[in-house]
Amino acid sequence: MKKTRTISFAELRQFLQTLGYQEKSADNAIVFDRAHADLLVFRRYSDHESVDLRDLVSTRKFLDAWGLLEAADFNNFLARATTSA
């Protein structure tokens, strides 16, 4: 995965919500839950903060492994993100 743009946490949140994830807040993390089937856990980001590359890579791997979204489709999301580099 070649990252050419920064992705804000707000953009990632919106994207995950389109896949059926619900956001929940924990003491030291932000958790996205999809029908109690799988969880994605992130450190606390502010809405406008750029998501770390390692978090984007792991999110892509999990979504692909769980059969929700192919890695290439996640890469397309990254390419279309509106936040400039």
Image (tube, helix red, strand yellow):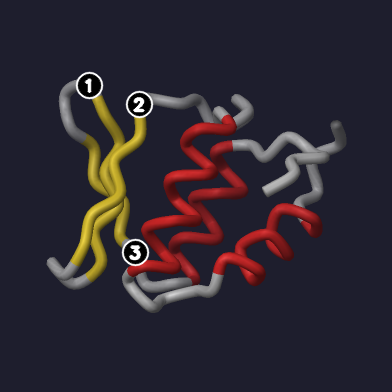
Give percent across and percent down for residue 57. Answer: 52, 44
Give percent across and percent down for residue 45. Answer: 46, 26
Res 33 → quadrant: bottom left
Q: Nearer the viewer, residue 37 or 61?
A: 61
The residue sitting at 44% across, 56% down in the picture is 61
Give percent across and percent down for residue 29. Answer: 26, 29
Image position of 2 (left or right of 52): right
Which residue is labeled 1 in the image? 28
Image position of 40 (left or right of 35): right
Residue at mark 2 to residue at mark 3: CA–CA distance? 17 Å
Which residue is labeled 3 in the image? 21
Image: 48 above or below 83: above
Residue at mark 2 to residue at mark 1: CA–CA distance? 7 Å
Image position of 48 (left or right of 6): left
Q: Secondary structure at mark 1?
A: loop
Q: Nearer the viewer, residue 14 or 53?
A: 53
Q: Secondary structure at mark 2?
A: strand
Which residue is labeled 2 in the image? 43
The residue sitting at 79% across, 39% down in the picture is 5
Query: Could you tell which of marks 2 and 1 lies nearer the N-terminus?
Result: 1
> Which class describes the residues within 10 Å of circle 1: few (<14), some (14-19), or many (20+)?
few
